[in-house]
Amino acid sequence: MMPDLNGKWMCELIYDESFGRLAHESMLFMIDFKKEGDELIGNSVDIDGIGMYPSKAKISGFVSNQQINFVKEYKIPIRKKPNTK
């Protein structure tokens, strides 16, 4: 049986060999999950390590066959070019 996933979770991402020289490096992040049926939603904040981004990430995912699958989506601001008129 899957545990209650609602609430805050400390997570660690470990880069695999496909990341070349970053292989085996890691990043810590905190997720605040809300489970609705088999779907997961929430927010994530990077805490420490390689690949940190300073703003929150949106979490969306699902639970299937006792496994948690999710994507972190960062909102990256778009810089406008100055008006050169």
Image (cartoon, rainbow, N blue to C red):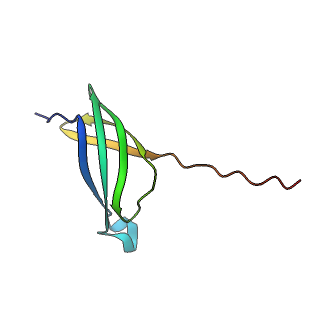
Residue at 63% from the left image edge and 49% from the top image edge? 78
For the view shown, which residue lies furthest in the top direction?
37
* Displayed quadrant of residue 43: top left
Residue 50 on image: x %, y %: 38, 65
Q: Is residue 40 above or below residue 77?
A: above
Relative side of 8 to 73, left or right? left
Q: Nearer the viewer, residue 66 or 34?
A: 34
Residue 46 on image: x %, y %: 36, 54
Q: Nearer the viewer, residue 16 or 25?
A: 25
* Quarter of the N terminus within the rendering: top left
Residue at 42% from the left image edge and 45% from the top image edge? 57
Relative side of 21 to 80, left or right? left
Relative side of 85 to 15, left or right? right
Residue 74 on image: x %, y %: 47, 47
Count the labels in the image: 0
Q: Nearer the viewer, residue 58 or 85?
A: 85
Q: Is residue 10 above or below residue 4?
A: below
For the view shown, which residue lies furthest in the bottom direction?
21
Residue 20 on image: x %, y %: 39, 71
For the view shown, which residue lies furthest in the right direction?
85
Residue at 26% from the left image edge and 52% from the top image edge? 11
